[in-house]
Amino acid sequence: MTYTLKLYVPDDTSPAQRQAAERLFRQALEEALGDAALVVPVYGAYLSIVAEHGETPDPEALTVEQRTVLESWQLAETAAIEAVFGPHRHLDEGGYQIVLAG
């Protein structure tokens, strides 16, 4: 399986800047997870956890495996966002969408 990434960046961002930012986001995400092949399964598992337990699940309500997935994804997501938008970005500045293919 593969994934499609869309970054939400300011309107005055050039196509080359957007592509460079998307490359940087992917690279940081994949490195934080340990391998590009882990993005789809970890993100899919994360989505399942959120669907079942909500956006901010109680860690005590999760299994050890679910907590591991949740924490892994959150750390990778933070690394990717910080790589592109910086560590002090505001919540309304930029964002991303991942679509799982296949």
Image: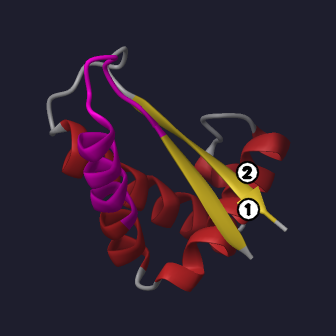
Mark 2 → mark 1, Cα distance in angstroms: 5 Å
Residue at point 37% right, 14% down? Answer: 92
Q: Is residue 57 left or right of residue 53?
A: left
Q: Tell me the quarter of the image containing the C terminus.
A: bottom right
x and y, in percent, of residue 99 in the image: 69, 50
Per the rendered image, the range of residues in magenta is: 7-26
Label placed on residue 47? 2
Q: Toward which corner of the image does residue 58 lie, by quadrant?
A: top right
Question: Could you tell me how many numbered marks the image carries?
Answer: 2
Q: Is residue 13 visible?
A: yes
Labels 2 and 1 touching (C-beta < 8 A): yes
Q: Residues within 10 Å of mark 1 (few under 14, many from 20)?
A: some
Q: Using the image, determine if residue 4 lies above or below residue 1.
A: above
Depicted 74 relative to depicted 10: above or below: below
Amino acid type indicated by mark 1:
Gly
Residue 86 location (% of width, % of height): 15, 39
Q: Say which of 60 and 94 sits in front.
A: 94
Element assignment for label 1: helix
Indicate the quadrant where residue 38 lies: bottom right
Image side of residue 88 versus residue 12, left or right:
left
- For disc 1, the marked residue is 44
Observer-nearest residue: 102 or 69? 102
Above or below 90: residue 88: below
Residue 8 falls inside the magenta stretch = yes
Q: Is residue 1 left or right of residue 58?
A: right
- On the question of residue 62 being in view, the answer is no
Q: Is residue 85 magenta?
A: no
Residue type of the residue flagged with mark 2? Leu
Mark 2, residues whose alpha carbon is within 10 Å: few (<14), some, or many (≥20)? some
Residue sitting at x 27%, y 59%: 24
